[in-house]
Image (cartoon, rainbow, N blue to C red):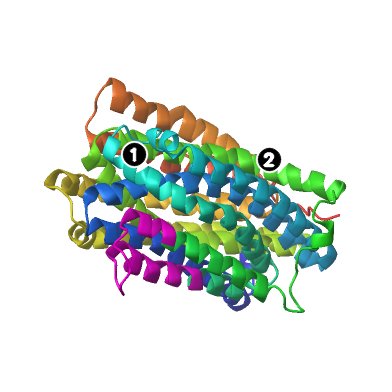
Amino acid sequence: MKTEMIDNKQFYNKLLQLAAPIAFQSLMLASVAAGDALMLGRIAQEEMTAVSLATQIQFVQNMFLMAITGAGAILGAQYWGKGDRETLRKLFNRMLRSAVLLSLIFFIACELVPGVLMRAFTQDDVLIRIGSAYLRTAGWSYLLSGISQCYLATLKVTDHVRASAWISSGAVVSNILLNAVLIFGLLGMPRMQARGAALATTISRVIELLFCIVVSAGHDHVRPKWSRIFHREGQLSADFLRQCLPLMGGSLLWGVGFTSYTAIMGHMGSDAAAANSVASVVRDLICCACNGIGSAAGIMVGNELGAGELEQGKAYGIKLKNLSFVIGFASTGLVLVITPLVVKMVILTDAARGYLTGMMIIMAVYMIGRCVNTVTINGVLDGGGDTLFDMYSLAVCMWGIAIPLAVLGAFVFHWPVLFVYACTCLDEVGKIPWVMIRFQKYKWVQNLTR
């Protein structure tokens, strides 16, 4: 089937129904980081920078959680397209077991050795002290987030994407409001600064999980069977691992790689770290649209393939890949337009402000590759079970090219800060041709259900 044969009205209606709530959810989640940066940036550069570095721990945890929930979503979307609710319940149990074990590991590390975690990103004693205090409180939120992410992933693939978005958004709104109260000491509360941001995050995670449990109690929702939570599902577990392990490898490569970028910039001085912290927040906000369309792409393609409509799924994939370029160039323009405003919004030294301006211009080019790869790889290819390619591309482009260049530039050749930052943006743009070649082999056009 050619893309011209797609009912455009039906296609865009379905895309909008899925992508808009997910993009909004992504925007709200990114707004927490933005709120932390803006509020703490009004207090002191050290507070803002320390929290930005400390939250890289949660970023790494989220990479693992994304692999677990991603594998469940890939299989779940296809089984939902097939109409098999019982298998979805078993998938839910399988996700929960893995997510809870992972969350426990990160929780224990944050409570027992927060200073060791912080030293991976900076040698500044002040930043380590502030970041360690943040992690000891925020670690409790990491324990809860694994459970809630399993609920939210299941809601998305079972036509309850709006409920998922509203739950996350409600938690984010509460997080931002609590941030203001606890960071600045409003309404009679003590002025807690960075620790206030951590406490606000933890309370909002409790609210999010409670909403997930209440909403999923509805009669038309897929829920885990707690009586069979430790029951092994045999072939389904094997299928889950077959999708999860490549996603885990890709998430590990990408998550640790991105964290390495932050660590490299953090070791280039507090001004470079501060500018990079603000640039990262802006990047995450701008990426919300492509995140939403990427997630929607996986669900749409997965539904069609799971229902046995391989040609329709293929046609959807082609159209979504083409759309990713439009989003990429639009994101580039948006970054350039908002750069002057962003530079004026936070309190930075003159050096950090200069770095931030240059980083924003470099990021504008990076956004093209980020949008194309998010929709094509994490959406279309993953939706059809072609999860190995992401791991291969990250191993070559990020770990074989971008990270070595950034490390050499920062610690051996002592390149200027903006040159090193540009190295950290090479991988997304550089792998576009490889991604297009992989896409056109159509290995992702497959039905994964049994």
Tell me if residue 450 can be seen: yes
Tell me the number on the disc at residue 128: 1
Q: Nearer the viewer, mark 1 or mark 2?
A: 1
**Residue 190 part of the magenta segment:** yes
Callout 1 amino acid: Ile
311 relative position to 17: left or right: right
Instruction: Out of 56 and 118, give the one closest to the viewer.
Output: 118
Highlighted range, magenta: 170-199
Q: Give the residue drawn at x 50%, y 67%.
A: 25
- Residue under pointer 2: 245
Where residue 66 appears, x then y in whole percent?
A: 59, 51
Instruction: Out of 107 and 67, give the one closest to the viewer.
Output: 107
Residue 252 drawn above or below residue 232? above
336 relative position to 34: left or right: left
Residue 233 drawn above or below residue 319? above
Where residue 442 appears, x then y in whole percent?
A: 68, 48
